[in-house]
Amino acid sequence: AIREFEEEFANYVNAKYAIACSNGTAALHLACKALGLSEGGKLVTSSITFLASANCAQFVNAETILSDVDPETFCLSIDGLEKVLKLQNIDVVIPVHFAGHSAEMNSILELKEKYGFNIIEDSCHSLGGEYKGSKVGSCDYSSLSTFSFHPVKHITTGEGGAVTTNDKKLYEKLIRFRAHG
């Protein structure tokens, strides 16, 4: 049933792969591991989020940096993010899609091209949402996207989470990490 759920979920968000895991926090942790974030690394995320988006860096001994949010959407502020990027080398940025609103992924992707970081979308609050014609979770603007199926989310499996990606190598790492390596 899990494999069928993963296939249906990937199809729904228009991603090549989906990997089910125990919860949204585990999804973020697996995503950081798959991208190789580790000690000495730095991750930036939104200052308005459930703390899993910040703690996932701590789980791999990396540093968490919180950035400002846009007062209109409560998603990651592009200006605030660029201020951080100008001051430090950042390995991973986790934009948090909040209350059904997508972060400005096109602008974040442009910053990625300029500053060279990886993107993990925290899509736990935006399942079913779209950004410029792309489903949230499609990974059109990121390497990985994470979801939670906690009882307060859009859909629930009682608990649970998922990671989506279009990268076969990341998918294979996620499958291995999900099964304890």
Image (cartoon, rainbow, N blue to C red):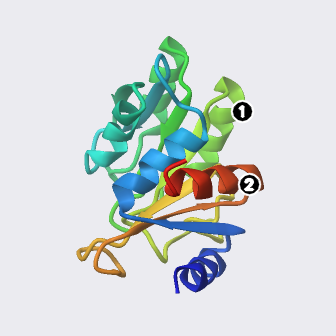
Name the residue that disc number 1 marks: 113
Residue in view at x 53 percent, y 40 percent = 33
Report if residue 69 is visible in the image. no
Specify the amino acid type for callout 2: Asp
* Mark 1: secondary structure: helix
Could you say which is closer to the camera, residue 132 or residue 20?
A: 20
Report if residue 140 is visible in the image. yes
Could you say which is closer to the camera, residue 168 or residue 122?
A: 168
| Label 2: how many Cα within 10 Å (few below 14, some 14–19, many 20+) | some
- Location of residue 23 in the rendering, given as x and y in whole percent from the top left corner: 36, 63
Could you say which is closer to the camera, residue 42 or residue 172?
A: 172
Of pointers 2 and 1, the one earlier in the residue sequence: 1
Residue in view at x 36 percent, y 35 percent = 59
Name the residue that disc number 2 marks: 167
- Location of residue 176 in the rendering, given as x and y in whole percent from the top left corner: 60, 53
Check the image and report above or below for 180 versus 138: above
Residue mark closest to the camera, 2 vs 1: 2
* Count of numbered tags: 2
